[in-house]
Amino acid sequence: MEEKRPQISVIVPVYNVEEYVEKCLASLAAQTYPAIEVLVVDDGSTDGSGSICDAWAAGDRRFQVIHFAENQGI
């Protein structure tokens, strides 16, 4: 009988972190656990953070990006 692994969701809040988000997403992409999804929440970034996140989602089906038009805050 095949062992069923639990799905793990990682939520990454993003707001104007263009300088750091690439390293964060690359680290998540390098994870070897097979049942992982990465939900990136772009909270109205005004820098290039949203575009970087979109590029990761286009290249890796485990990544999904949610964009808010303006910052929602905490």
Image: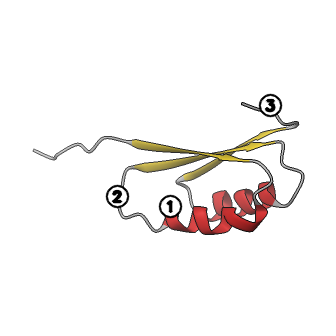
Amino acid found under the numbered disc labelled 3: Gln
Structural distance between the alpha carbons of marks 2 and 1? 10 Å
- The structure residue drawn at horizontal position 69% and vertical position 65%, both measured from the top left corner, is 20
- The structure residue drawn at horizontal position 56% and vertical position 68%, both measured from the top left corner, is 26
- In this rendering, the count of numbered labels is 3
Amino acid found under the numbered disc labelled 1: Leu
Colouring scheme, one of rainbow, by chain, secondary structure, one colour: secondary structure
x and y percent of residue 55 in the render?
A: 72, 63
Of 3 and 70, nearer the camera is 70
User: Disc 2 marks which residue?
Assistant: 33
SS at mark 2 in the image:
loop
Of 63 and 24, nearer the camera is 24
Number of residues whose C-alpha sits closer than 10 Å to that of mark 2, classed few (under 14), some (14–19) or many (20 or more): few
Number of residues whose C-alpha sits closer than 10 Å to that of mark 3, classed few (under 14), some (14–19) or many (20 or more): few
Between label 2 and label 1, give the one nearer the viewer: 1
Mark before the other along the chain sequence, 3 or 1: 1
Picture layout, residue 46 above or below residue 51: above
Structural distance between the alpha carbons of marks 2 and 3? 31 Å
User: Disc 3 marks which residue?
Assistant: 72
